[in-house]
Amino acid sequence: MSHLPVIVGMGGINPAGRTSGHQAFRRTVLDTLPADQQRQTLESLAALMRLAEHSENGWHDRSGQPIDAPAESLREQVLNHTLIRRNEDPRFLDPGLPSNRQASIQLAEPLRFTLRRRQLPENLPVGWQVRDIDAHEVEVSVPAGVLEVLLPDAQQPKVRAAAQLPSGFDPASLYRSIHHPRGLSLAVFGASDCLGASGLSWETLRQQLNPDHIAVYAGNSIGQLDEQGWGGLLKSLVSGQRATSKQMPLGYGQMPADFLNAYVLGSVGGTGAAQGACASFLYNLRLGIDDIRAGRRRVVMVGTADAPITPEIIEGFRAMGALADDAGLKALDALELLTDSDYQRACRPFARNCGFTMAEASQFVLLMDDALAMEVGADILGAVPDVFVNADGYKRSISAPGIGNYITLGKAAALVRDMLGEKALKERSFLHAHGTSTPKNRITESHVFDEIARANGITDWPVVAVKAFIGHSQGTAAGDQLASALGSFAHGLLPGIPTLDAVAGDVYAERLRLSQAAQTFHADATFLNAKGFGGNNATGVVLSPAVTERLLIQRHGTAAVSAWKGRREATREAAAAFIAQADKGHYAPRYQFGEAVLEGPELDIHADRIHIPGYHHAVSLTSDNPFGRLDEEM
């Protein structure tokens, strides 16, 4: 019997807030929640954004002044500085994006100027003459003629909408980060949030396992391209800056996994990162699922962390015609000027739209096989039986959609039908659309949905498109969808598509339920859909906690499930205590730099096993050999 991969922890951060405790999910259905949950959500977001702090004396601002009702007094500030909004990065504000413009200056007569000696070019241009002034300065003479220069400039951004993390939240300020790219700081926070919210002690858990039964699959879609990563490295020469020793290694796309192994988990087990454009989270999730189903690993942390809101990345996607730029948004609504509220409506899945909105996010889940989860009393949030991946085949453009997504969603629907029955597929499942808000996506993805619905006899398939709230975080997009799906299971609510004033005329919506408002819906399963650049299609199946429990009874028996529920109580208490502290703005990311470092001599090595200090169980060196054995030569 195959092992069932179950989710026992989730954590992260996106423009709607923190993943643990369903804070981010609640932000997307805020007006539908009961009054006490609205208050708690707004207070915890205010704490995240450093607008309010909580101590034994209650809520107060950063100067120590009491705040009687932060949910009321700070409501508008919280709402206006979460989700999609006008880009708040100072580089995107007046006077504009720092840049340079090439120019050819015609010198009518020789030019003379002074310069610090260390600023001189290593190879002087032809005709330049240099005279020493003192030990530090020189005088430079340039002959008349043409002088090629770069003139400092400030360009008005053509794209101002962005889905940034809630204003005031800085993951790098929460731990000893030194020149860490933003994506890696997000990874440290997201993985720590996941561990804390699981209610499990990592040190205790890993003592129960062979070190080789743990794995980490984490990465992102395009690496770290901000100043501290490859972005700063690649422009260092032309910008006159020096490359640092950290920019090259920290820029790699698999670095989130490396950081988790080295500084968060101390894992020596399996590791890796799969990159698949917008489907990267699902690619990594698939690696974890395959390992657990096959029995190779028993605990896997899976996730992605993307921080692509930089001038260069945004300009690159804008040049492709992929982003909702200011000109496109004005044309959509026949506007002369865009206001803050217009930017908040920039992403419009399945409506008349003009492009996606760039976002940043970090999402992590902790997977276990079902037997171990029951043994340790883990709180099971759902199950992920499979992720299906198919390419597009031949097509005209590398970025254009193709046929692979029909196959992935078709396989996923068939799995749910086989596991849960036809009624569950037709009446108690919903779709988490990739829903980028591009004209091409609204047509092609809706056609995939409508055709698979027709093939399975589905007439009213609910569709959720969370990018309307939180934008497109590239490789982490499906992680955002998974976090939202787990929130839907917990609350019985599906987020609406608030920017869907009307379904576009070219959308195939005959068998789909596209709603502007949140809906009450008690689901057995959801489908996480991703249509990535280059033909990276993936669809993941996620089962609800209730359905997962029924599977556990079928697989392990009622008595075993009852015993698991008894052990689960302590785990839930620990998770609730962690979330209560996080809701008050008290975070302690797990970052163990330079602790318990092992380099080889400390190991106890045998032919069939290696004992590692800090682990109770040895690593077995015995490998399965399916190839047979040759007789030894005489």
Image (cartoon, grey):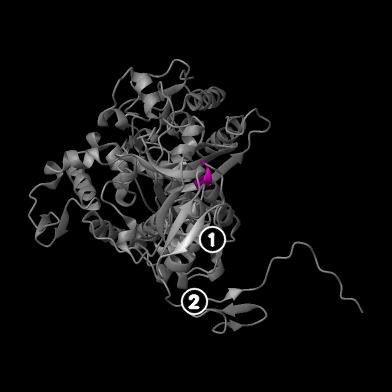
Q: Identify the element where label 2 is drawn.
A: loop
Image quadrant of residue 589?
Answer: bottom left
Image quadrant of residue 75?
Answer: top left
- Residue 352: image x %, image y %? 41, 20
Compared to 633, does 130 lie above or below?
Answer: above
Q: Which mark is residue 441?
A: none
Residue at 57% across, 84% down: 601
The secondary structure making up most of the magenta span is: helix
Alpha carbon distance from label 1 to label 2 = 54 Å
Instruction: State whether residue 124 appears in this view.
Output: yes
- Residue 540: image x %, image y %? 51, 41
Q: Which mark is residue 122?
A: 1
Look at the image and give the residue range highlighted in magenta. Answer: 278-282
- Residue 620: image x %, image y %? 61, 73
Asked if residue 494 is among those painted magenta in the image, a careful observer would answer no
Instruction: State whether residue 543 appears in this view.
Output: no
Q: Nearer the viewer, residue 328 or 194?
A: 328
The residue type indicated by label 2 comes to Tyr
Residue at 73% across, 65% down: 625
Q: Nearer the viewer, mark 1 or mark 2?
A: 1
Q: Nearer the viewer, residue 415 or 23?
A: 23
Whether pointer 1 and pointer 2 mark residues with C-beta atoms closer than 8 Å, the reply is no
Compared to 456, does 153 lie above or below?
Answer: below
The residue type indicated by label 1 comes to Glu
Q: Which mark is residue 615?
A: 2
Q: Earlier in the sequence, mark 1 or mark 2?
A: 1
Compared to 547, does 516 lie above or below?
Answer: above
User: Outermost residue toward the right?
Assistant: 634
Image quadrant occupied by the C terminus: bottom right
